Amino acid sequence: MPFIHDKSPLFDYSVIPKWARLLAQLLLMLVSILCSINTSMSVAEPLTLTLAAEDSWPPFADDVGSGISHNLIKQAFKQVDVAVSTVVVPYSRGLFMAERGTVDGVFNVTREQSTVERFVFGEQPLFTVTASFFFAKEYPTVANNKWQLPMRSTIGIVDGYEYGDQFIALVEQRKLHILRVKSQRQLINLLLVGRIDTAIMFDRVAEVYIKQLGVNQDIQAKFSNHKSEIFVAFAKQNPQAKHFSQLLDKGLLMLQKQGRYEPLLLPSHD
């Protein structure tokens, strides 16, 4: 008897109910979708921001890209899984870059009327600083507050810095002459040679430069100009600016809750 090859299938799928076959197909599709999602998530790039950082505001930000602000911002964003890279430039250029949208933001910026119109800010400041009127010992003043400054005094400021919402009114009332320079180091030198009558400088920054120049006895603060809450200012042109500011707020609050915020404000963390 010749051998007959049986070509019938080993298993008859027709005996499986139609609903069961449809369910199996759906399960296979679901597994495929989940695998695809998992693969895309595993290769997704971490969120990275590029911020402009000024180059002459120690101990907060210096010309080599270090300082209190750098550490604080990076640690705050690290809490929310965001990496930060910085471009170190003069302050006025950093503001320009952020306005143009060539960077995601810039620090250290005071939130006041003039800057709120140009940038997006969060709710949590990085820290608060004070700015004072400084005088050379050789050229003292009779004024006891900024509203008593002699009429038509020459006052030195750093180009691009914010000096509080009252500054314009002060200049107009006292008819002050404004000399703009690039850094607080320059202001100190101008005070020493009598080129300006006074200079507004941020106290902690002035302390660094006065110590470096060895003129502790020659330059002193006499009265306050204003207090500033310092922020990261995010570029309005970036559609994610508000989201970035909220992430930074969250990171700063997390650092405070962990007890790690205050230590980061100390110069030893530079």
Image: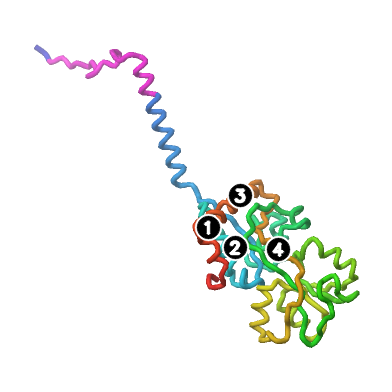
Q: Earlier in the sequence, mark 1 or mark 3?
A: 3
Residue located beneath label 3 in the image: 246
Counting residues from the N terminus, which is met first, the one under dot 4 or under dot 2?
2
Q: Residue at x 85, y 74 (%)?
A: 149
Q: Nearer the viewer, mark 4 or mark 3?
A: 4
User: Is residue 174 in the magenta section?
Assistant: no
Observer-side mark, 4 or 2, equals 4
Kind of residue sitting beneath label 1 = Leu
Q: The residue tagged with tag 3: helix, strand or loop?
A: helix
* Quadrant holding the N terminus: top left
Which residue, as the protein is rendered here, is positioned at the far front? 144
- Looking at the rendered structure, the kind of residue marked 4 is Ser
Task: Tell which of 3 and 20 is nearer to you.
Answer: 20
Residue 47: give x, y in percent of width and height: 54, 51
The boundaries of the magenta stretch are: 3-25
Asked if residue 12 is among those painted magenta in the image, a careful observer would answer yes
Q: Residue 6 placed where, x, y %? A: 19, 16
Q: Look at the image and tell me in which quarter the C terminus lies.
A: bottom right
CA–CA distance in space, label 2 to label 1? 21 Å
- Kindly identify which residue carries mark 4: 228
Type of residue at label 2?
Answer: Thr
* Extreme-left residue of the structure: 1
**Nearer the viewer's eye, disc 3 or disc 2?**
3
Q: Residue 111, percent across and down?
A: 72, 58
Image disc number at residue 86: 2
In the displayed structure, 224 sits above or below 243; it is below
Residue 4 seen: yes
The answer to whether residue 215 is left or right of residue 3 is right
Q: Going from the N terminus, do you reach mark 4 or mark 3 first?
A: 4
